[in-house]
Amino acid sequence: MNKINKLYSILLLVPALALAAGDHVRLDRAPINEDDQASLQRGARHFVNYCLNCHSANYMRFNRLRDIGLSEMQIRDNLIFTGVKVGDLMKIAMDPKDAKAWFGATPPDLSVIARSRASEAGSGADWLYTYLRGFYRDPERPTGWNNTVYANVGMPHVLWELQGEQVLAERKVRGDGFMKTEMALKLDKPGTMTPAEYDQMAADLVNYLVFMGEPVRGNRKTIGMFVLLALGVLFIFAYALKKEYWKDVH
């Protein structure tokens, strides 16, 4: 019975230990702007070109891209490469069984990935931004790639031609009165983009993923402001009515 209790206690601690380990990852602040339609449009293009081949977005319709300033003709001509309609969901043709056999796990749906990755360490946008910039060469992994945010990731670095190839290398940093060594990413082979250009691309893609997690956020904020304004006006009338009703009561 004691052995069972000890095993049960260990199993209870596993999730807490995993969460604690994840909190040690330092996340970079994602420089996104949800009101920047040009950035959102670039992010939608990147998502369709590089992500939608393997990752679905089963809770997002193509025509919701009208909310970021695109017309149905622009969506159909520039962002739809199959026979689906503008009002259809962003699904993929890849069979989940084939995907699991190829990658070791079925690529997750990305509809709400920005919301699901939020934690005490940072927002979901910060996690995604750091993740997209955190791939490095690792010959011990089946795909040849690993990630500083998601250790032993099964996803290959599909953007490596743009970013280039990074490696983990030692670097000296100043501690509390002494020098210490830590592992950091180093660009070993440049890609077709400069580091600044790739960071901007990652930011645009993350900006779109945040939008896709809640496309009605802008409308919700606008409606909320009108509701608060209406409640403010009603409060003035309610207060005036209260004073008039109770003016003769002592």
Image (cartoon, helix red, strand yellow):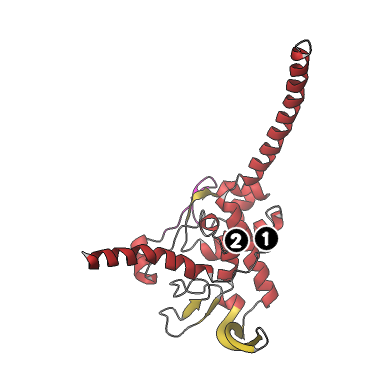
Q: What is the quadrant of residue 237 in the picture?
A: top right
Q: Residue furthest left?
A: 1
Q: What is the quadrant of residue 45 in the picture?
A: bottom right
- What residue did someone put label 2 on? 125
Helix, strand, or loop for circle 2?
Answer: helix
Q: Position of residue 110 (x, y in %)?
A: 50, 57
User: The disc labelled 2 sits on which kind of residue?
Assistant: Ala
Q: Is residue 96 left or right of residue 120?
A: left
Q: What is the quadrant of residue 219 in the picture?
A: top right
- Identify which residue is drawn at 57% across, 48% down: 214
Residue closest to the eye, 221 or 6: 6
Q: Is residue 149 left or right of residue 236?
A: left
Q: Which residues are magenta?
A: 81-93
Q: Residue furthest front?
A: 250
Q: Can residue 233 be seen in the rendering of this structure?
A: yes
138 magenta-colored: no
The overriding secondary structure of the stretch rendered in magenta is loop
Disc 1/disc 2 C-alpha distance (Å): 8 Å
Q: Position of residue 47 (x, y in %)?
A: 57, 61
- What residue did someone put label 1 on? 32
- Identify which residue is drawn at 51% across, 47% down: 85
Determine whether 64 is above or below 185 in the image.
Answer: above
User: The disc labelled 1 sits on which kind of residue?
Assistant: Ile
CA neighbours of label 1 inside 10 A, class few (<14), some (14 to 19), many (20+): many
Q: Position of residue 20 (x, y in %)?
A: 48, 67
- Identify which residue is drawn at 55% across, 84% down: 168
Determine whether 39 is above or below 104 in the image.
Answer: above
